[in-house]
Amino acid sequence: MDRTVDCVKLGPNKEGLEKPPFKGELGEKVFNTISKEAWGMWLEHSKILINEYRLDLTSEHGQKIWFSELEKYFYGDGSDLPDEFVEKK
């Protein structure tokens, strides 16, 4: 474990990301406050959002929703799964 962070999702002394996941202020904030494990959890959660909402992350609209949900997931009240989502067993 090269780098540790006090993760807002999973607590102190967790393995940190190797580099910011994207550019900008939010990317730096994630880098400094989110663990590698929590980032992986977000990526799994966001796959569901992308598929259920049919988000196009190459579009400004899709990116705006994705970033908004990311902020809610880590720094807000949480990012809910779509009402229509049914987990496969």
Image: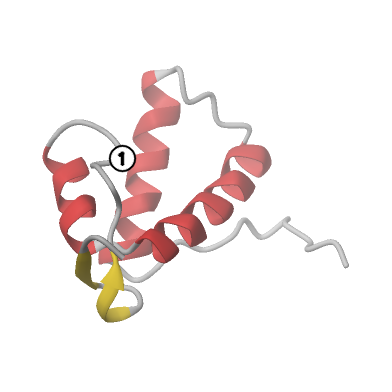
At a point 15% along the width and 52% down the height, the residue shown is 29
Q: Can you tell which quarter of the image residue 50 is in? A: top right
Image point 28% across, 60% down: which residue?
16
Q: Which residue is mark 1?
A: 21
Q: Quadrant of residue 45?
A: bottom right
Residue 65 in the image: state x and y as whole percent. Answer: 40, 39
SS for dot 1: loop
13 on left or right of 65: left
* Residue positioned most to the front: 2
Image: 4 above or below 61 = below
Extreme-right residue of the structure: 89
User: Hey, what amino acid is under mark 1?
Assistant: Pro
Q: Position of residue 41 (x, y in %)?
A: 50, 61
> Quick one: quadrant of the N terminus?
bottom left
Asked if residue 20 is positioned above or below residue 57 in the image, the reply reads below
Compared with residue 29, is residue 83 higher up or lower down, i.e. above or below? below
Quarter of the image for residue 58 reads: top left
Identified at 39% across, 30% down, the residue is: 63
As drawn, the residue found furthest toward the left would be 25
